[in-house]
Amino acid sequence: MLAAGAASVAVGRLASDAALKAPAGRPLPTEPRLTVHRTAAGQVTLTRDLATLRPGTYGLAGNGSHAVVGDVLHSAEHTADTVVRRLQGVTHGTLAPGDSVWLTPNLHVGNPGTALGLDHADIDVPGELGSLPAWFVPGARDTWVIAVHGLGTTREHALNVMRFLHERRLPVLALAYRGDLGAPRPPDGLHHLGETEWRDVDAAIRYAVRYGARRVVLLGWSTGATMALRAAERSAVRDRVAGLVLDSPVLSWEATLRALARARHTPGPLLPLAVRAAQGRAGLHADRTRGPAAADGHERLAVPTLILHGPGDAVAPWEFSRRMAAHQPHLVALHTVPHAPHGAMWNPDPEGYEERVRRFLTPLM
């Protein structure tokens, strides 16, 4: 019995790694591994899966390669177990039959200069644990956008919307935070799903104010959205936060942890052990679903907030975003995006996404 108990605890600890040790730039366990079956002029044939049938434009990442794929080409010749998508270009590396790949929201690799041709500066933001690398793209306005990536991605994720923000003359600060490449390592080596990382967003707000920002808008994806929420609630300079744009926010760490552990094929009876292991290892508080997403509203948002989220999110349940918007409709607008995976609300319809964000940002500029 003792051995069985110890084994169960070990499995729970391993299952909790799906969230607490999610490597940046690698697929989450909810994202299937795919196989390249064939390439042709402007086409790539992939394993047939719900993921490869998604509408929109995505990055296609492999070990040492990156490409951009567009919509499904339904009229292209294919077998019953494959899907053909438009191949818009190979960013680096090669795609060959048999390669293992996965879809990613990141269309670009590199930095704002190499990927988009935008002037930028590589800066260091003084953080609680040390210097935090960031890209700064200048703009004429005194409202800055601070962009914060989430689980499984890097600050390259912000490149998807960087040109759109730059065209509106908004200065943009894209932050790498604790645990990212080049940033300080957390003392325990774990992600805390925003509960400690928000202090790095606080440091970015202070940096922006120090260098001329009158106000800031926090734009976050996944746990980056959670960090933005926490900073807007807790930062001593939260009065400088003019608004929040939250893509696929993680509003319940328990629900997200369960989803990632389940995707790792953790047996149902062991999921509570994964939750307890995460709480003990990372010092997570009682589930924050009674925080900003709560129906009882003990913690109310104080700034205009746009949430972009969809019911297809297998990592951060859309229901919590819907509840949050219903509770504070005077401050929170929810834009529902169908058929989009976690952290990828831009990819199915970039123009629609950007128009929604433009309308939200206009009065805050």
Image (cartoon, rainbow, N blue to C red):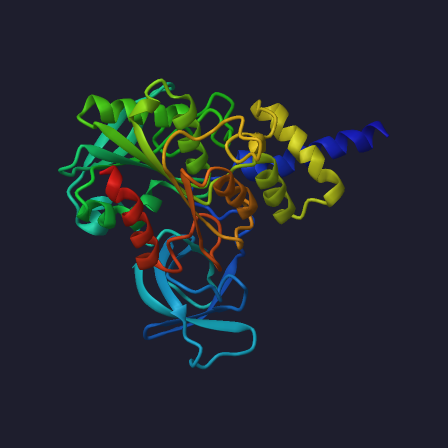
Q: Nearer the viewer, residue 228 or 75?
A: 228
Of all residues, the one furthest to the front in this rendering is 330
Q: Is residue 306 above or below residue 102?
A: above
Question: On the picture, is 267 further left or further right than 74?
Answer: right
Residue positioned 22% across, 34% down in the render: 143
Q: Nearer the viewer, residue 177 or 341?
A: 341
Of all residues, the one furthest to the left in this rendering is 140
Question: On the picture, is 169 further left or further right than 96?
Answer: left
Q: Nearer the viewer, residue 147 or 358?
A: 358
Q: Is residue 303 above or below residue 167?
A: above
Q: Is residue 210 above or below residue 161?
A: above
Residue positioned 50% across, 32% down in the render: 292
Q: Which x, y percent locates residue 307?
A: 42, 44
Of all residues, the one furthest to the right in this rendering is 1
Residue 109 makes an appearance in the image: no
Q: Quadrant of residue 353?
A: bottom left
- The quadrant of the rendering that contains the C terminus is top left
Q: Nearer the viewer, residue 77 or 148?
A: 148
Q: Which x, y percent locates residue 216?
A: 27, 31
Q: Which x, y percent locates residue 101?
A: 46, 58
**Total marks in image:** 0
Q: Which x, y percent locates residue 107?
A: 33, 54
